[in-house]
């Protein structure tokens, strides 16, 4: 078996993304794309909000850095394992995609309900695992649906979907920071809310999204899909798990995710404990990590459609390593703020390009499983990173975390540079 990229009319064959299969359905309109993107934004609002709760939760429960890292590692492990049944169900029951999306948001709501009611470390850890499972259940049905519906604009479709996530990631920290820290401005005085109350409020958007999906897609998926049998699924999955291009993207996704989770988590702790920033200031800086990505995500997606996935993902992972190292000297004030913005151009924005590269290497009918492999492998491999970063932060402070994360990103850039691309072809 050898692995090559499908040629595109104006590109070098070794770098161009795969052409769409002749029998792939053409997209009829973009309502599905923007609807899934909006739901993805709500999901990431809930996913990102927990970061702002961490300093309060850590202080209330008396947790160490390692304990906090372990909670997020457990969340990532749960997220990874959940992708496996999500991929199976997506490919076998294509017409049940709306139901899977409803279950996804229900889990997110239940997780925040548990956090709001918990005074116990282990129950909070389980709550994060429930949230992790819920967020992962969204990926396989949503990304695979977009890959099938938009074969000629796959990079852009993945990027548009992820732009919704960027909007959720950007608005959550500022909104939650305001709710926690209150406001004192022009005579307006408000002390804010207790973190448990904020956690309970986060149940509302999750369940509202469930009811919107139910009302919008109560008749099933907006397009008819042919289900496949278990034997067909297992055969296709076996081929997928022997596909070096998909496995390489799963590893790259793991390193990107580990870099993102580790630097984001301990940047929040660094700003809270070392720099004594307010909740609102912390939320503002976390928002900046994704604000720039709202514009850069679709640009990187379109560039990957035109120039090829390899050049875009390699350059982006190298930029992540560079700007993470920037925290060694940009450690406070306006320099830290600028460095956060520069890092945010690439930190999350490259993820849809990695997903598109995996879709390029996936046979028709196995899209859900491909997404599952990508996110499961990424979450499971990356699950240890927050705990390792916690131990490093305890021993060598935030500078140690910076060097650790920059190393992960640099290894990712190297893997992106040499990774096989496209569908395997017989020798």
Image (cartoon, rainbow, N blue to C red):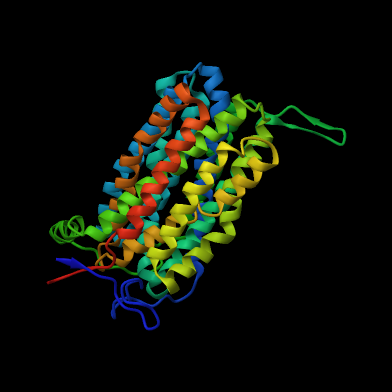
Q: Quadrant of residue 221?
A: bottom left
Q: Position of residue 194 (x, y in %)?
A: 63, 25
302 in relation to 375, above or below: below
Relative image position of residue 369 (x, y in whole percent): 27, 56
- Residue 420, image x and y in percent? 27, 62
Reply above or below: 258 against 238. above
Q: Quadrant of the C terminus?
A: bottom left
- Residue 301: give x, y in percent of width and height: 47, 65
Left or right of 257 on screen, residue 268: right
Looking at the picture, tell me which residue is in the foreground, 319 or 85. Answer: 319
Residue toward you, 223 or 187:
187
* As drawn, 159 above or below 257: below
182 sits left or right of 46 in the view: right
Farthest residue toward the top?
62
Residue nearer the viewer, 199 or 407:
407
Q: Nearer the viewer, residue 234 or 332?
A: 332
Q: Residue at horizontal 41%, vertical 65%?
A: 311
Q: How many marks?
A: 0
**Residue 103 visible in the shown view:** no
* Residue 144, quarter of picture: bottom left
Q: Residue furthest right?
A: 187
């Amino acid at each position: 078996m050898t692995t090559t990229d499908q040629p595109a009319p104006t590109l070098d064959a070794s770098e161009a993304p795969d052409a769409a299969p002749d029998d792939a359905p053409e997209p009829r309109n973009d309502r599905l794309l923007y609807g899934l993107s909006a739901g993805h934004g709500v999901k990431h609002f809930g996913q990102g909000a927990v970061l702002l709760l961490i300093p309060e939760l850590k202080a209330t429960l008396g947790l160490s850095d390692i304990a906090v890292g372990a909670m997020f590692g457990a969340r990532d492990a749960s997220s990874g394992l959940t992708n496996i049944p999500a991929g199976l169900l997506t490919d076998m029951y294509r017409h049940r995609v709306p139901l899977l999306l409803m279950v996804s948001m229900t889990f997110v709501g239940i997780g925040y309900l548990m956090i709001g009611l918990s005074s116990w470390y282990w129950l909070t850890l389980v709550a994060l695992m429930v949230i992790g499972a819920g967020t992962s259940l969204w990926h396989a049905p949503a990304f695979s649906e977009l890959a099938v519906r938009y074969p000629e604009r796959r990079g852009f479709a993945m990027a548009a979907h992820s732009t919704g996530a960027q909007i959720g990631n950007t608005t959550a920290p500022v909104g939650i920071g305001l709710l926690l820290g209150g406001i004192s401005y022009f005579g307006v005085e408000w002390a804010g809310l207790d973190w448990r109350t904020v956690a309970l409020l986060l149940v509302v958007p999750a369940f509202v999204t469930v009811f919107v999906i139910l009302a919008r897609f109560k008749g099933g998926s907006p397009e008819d899909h042919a289900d496949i049998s278990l034997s067909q699924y297992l055969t296709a999955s076996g081929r997928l798990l022997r596909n070096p291009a998909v496995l390489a993207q799963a590893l790259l996704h793991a390193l990107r995710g580990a870099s993102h989770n580790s630097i984001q988590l301990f940047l929040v702790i660094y700003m809270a404990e070392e720099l004594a920033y307010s909740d609102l200031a912390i939320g503002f800086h976390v928002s900046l990590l994704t604000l720039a990505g709202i514009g850069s995500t679709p640009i990187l997606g379109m560039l990957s459609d035109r120039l090829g996935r390899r050049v875009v993902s390699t350059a982006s992972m190298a930029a992540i390593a560079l700007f993470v190292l920037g925290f060694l000297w940009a450690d406070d004030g306006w320099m830290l703020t600028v460095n956060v913005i520069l890092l945010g151009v690439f930190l999350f924005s490259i993820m849809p390009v990695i997903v598109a590269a995996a879709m390029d290497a996936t046979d028709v009918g196995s899209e859900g499983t491909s997404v599952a492999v990508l996110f499961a492998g990424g979450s499971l491999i990356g699950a240890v990173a927050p705990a390792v970063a916690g131990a490093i932060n305890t021993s060598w402070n935030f500078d140690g975390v910076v060097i650790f994360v920059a190393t992960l990103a640099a290894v990712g850039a190297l893997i992106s540079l040499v990774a096989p691309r496209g569908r395997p072809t017989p020798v």
